[in-house]
Structures are given as C-alpha cells and as structure tokens.
Image (tube, grey):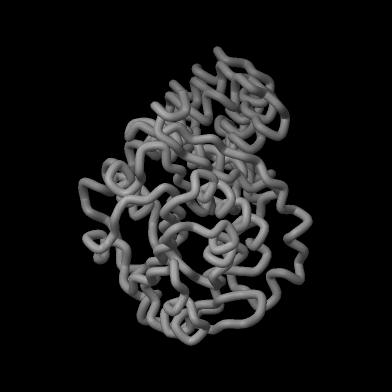
Amino acid sequence: MAEDDQLCEAAAKGEAEKVQSLVASGADVTYFNEDGLTPLMLAAKHGHADVVKSLLDAGAPWNALSPSNLSAGDFAMDSAHQDAFDILLNAGIQAELILGTIARKENKVGDLDGEYLQDRVSFSEDKLMDAESKAVMMAWEKPLMEAHAKAICSRGGHILNIGFGMGLVDTSIQQYGPVTHTIVEAHPEVYDRMRASGWTQKENVKVVFGRWQDVLPQLESYDGIFFDTYGEYYDDLREFHQHLPTLLKPGGIYSFFNGLCGGNAFFHVVYCQLVSLELESLGYTTQLIPLPVKDCLGDEVWKGVKHKYWQLDTYYLPVCESSEDSE
C-alpha cells in the first residue's frame, strides 16, 4: 500500500525515474489514492507527459474515473496540459479502435434496439420517453435539430432522415422545401403518431416503417442524410456509415446526432475523433461545429427523466462530406 501511495506522489511530482522504478518493483498502476485519484490522473493533472506515457505503457487504465466523474484526460484538458492530453487522446482512440474490432469480430451487437421497439413509449409536450422513463428525445434538442436540418439541406434536393422521434428535425427539414423527404421510423407507436398527425399525407414526404437495417433495399440516394436512432450501439452507427457511399450522393452532406459519451467531456472528444477517423477511411471529411447548450439544460429540464444523456456545455455538430468535394 505504501508503495502505491509513493507511486501516486512520484507521478504528481513528475519524478519519471522513480515512477519507473516503483512500477518495476510491483506498484499498482490501477491504484486509487484516498482522494480517489490514480497515478495517471495525478500525472495528467500536473502535466507530466513523460510520466503519463510511462504509466500508460505499464497498463494504467486511460478511462478510469475519479469520484467526480473525471478521467485522466479530463484533468489534462481542464489544466490545459496539451502534451499530456494528446498522449491520452491517442491512447483512448487506439484502445477504442481495438475494442471496436473485437466487438465486430465477436458480433456483440446486443438486442437493446429490439427491446426498445417492443416497449411502450409516452409522449408529452417536451419529451418522448421509453418504458423505463429514459428520454428518447427531448424538446431542448430543438435548436440542435434546426442546425442539423440546415446543414443537411444546404445542397437542396432529396433528404433522408433515420429516426423520427418527436419530429423536431423533420419539421425543420420541411422548412427548406426538399424535393423529396424520406423518413425511416422503426417504433410502431411513433409511426402511428406520425400517421395521425399527417406526416404520411405530405406531398414530398415518404415514410418508411421499419429498422433501417431492414429497409435499406427501399432507400435510394440522397443529397442530405441525418441519422438519429435510439437504443442502438456505436457499432450500429459504424455499420450505417458503411452504407454512406451508396446512400449519399457525390457532393451530399451527412450528419448524425452526436450524443457519443455525452456525460464525460474527454470521452466525448475521444469518440468525436474516432468517428471522424472512421469516416475519413470511407472518404469523408468531418467538420465539428461547436454549439453552446448550457443555457438549454437547467435542472428542470430533466425532471422525471431517469438518465441525463447529455451533461456537457458544448455540443459538436458533425457536418460530413466527401473529401473530394471539400477540397
């Protein structure tokens, strides 16, 4: 125990040689001190990039969280220690790339989406909730949805939206008068509500009922695409991206609801970079536009909601286009 506390102290002071010596003699790099901080967090907090690298190489978990829900990357970011931050960001991206590969190899897709589609949902003026009082969509997202709609409609033409929810983004899309507006919705109650409110009667709207994975053969190619599903995993988003070269016309714009790791600032940065890299490998550039949302998220917003799915002050709106078109 004393050796582990010595490791924390040496990491905080940036004593690289002592850190390496303690690790070699068996000190625990996963140890949390009495303040709930790991050696990696302490090194990151004080900007000791060389110690951060040594600890990561020794197996220190990049994604461990303190009692206040902060990771080593958050400490580096909050203290503006760029070198330490860059090392931790790269470690996070590499780890998630590897884990993603493992998940695909083992086909760990899960069935959360299937459970959601069988659940009852409840509608109110400001939210759509699932059976467990978790928010599917909320009214505070309206300015974000308006911004997404503006982005994907910027080239005009034919628009596709995956996931209707409360209809916020689709209402905004209609304001831009697309030639055609295709909406894919998988939840039967949401679909029934769409029909009752006249969405299936609109002249330029085509509503496709079903999971996007199942209705792909019914889809065409589009000038703008938005993706926002509920109850799916990152692998589902990644799988959808594999279809972009077929679904998105050359010169088209793609965007998605960027709720990735919305409860932790550093993890969110990791996933923003990860998805940008994966889209780049498919031939797309991603611009992340910062939108302040702190003023939209008072405590009253979450009243009756089981899980705060967004807790950050800034939302990064992704605008993706073919790298050839952006040159």
Report the front residue among 282 and 20. 282
The residue drawn where x is 50% and y is 71% is: 165
Instruction: Identify the image quadrant of residue 139.
Output: bottom right
Residue 39 seen = yes
x and y percent of residue 107 in the render? 22, 54
Looking at the image, residue 284 lies above or below residue 175: above
Looking at the image, residue 84 lies above or below residue 301: above
x and y percent of residue 47 in the render? 66, 22
Residue 66 seen = no
Looking at the image, residue 183 lies above or below residue 101: below
x and y percent of residue 10 in the render? 63, 23
Q: Is residue 289 left or right of residue 292?
A: left
Q: Is residue 71 left or right of residue 20?
A: right
Q: Is residue 284 left or right of residue 299?
A: left
x and y percent of residue 78 in the render? 71, 34
The residue drawn where x is 38% and y is 81% is: 188
Q: Residue furthest top?
A: 17
Instruction: Identify the image quadrant of residue 124.
Output: bottom right
The residue drawn where x is 68% and y is 46% is: 291
Instruction: Identify the image quadrant of residue 45.
Output: top right
Looking at the image, residue 209 lies above or below residue 120: above
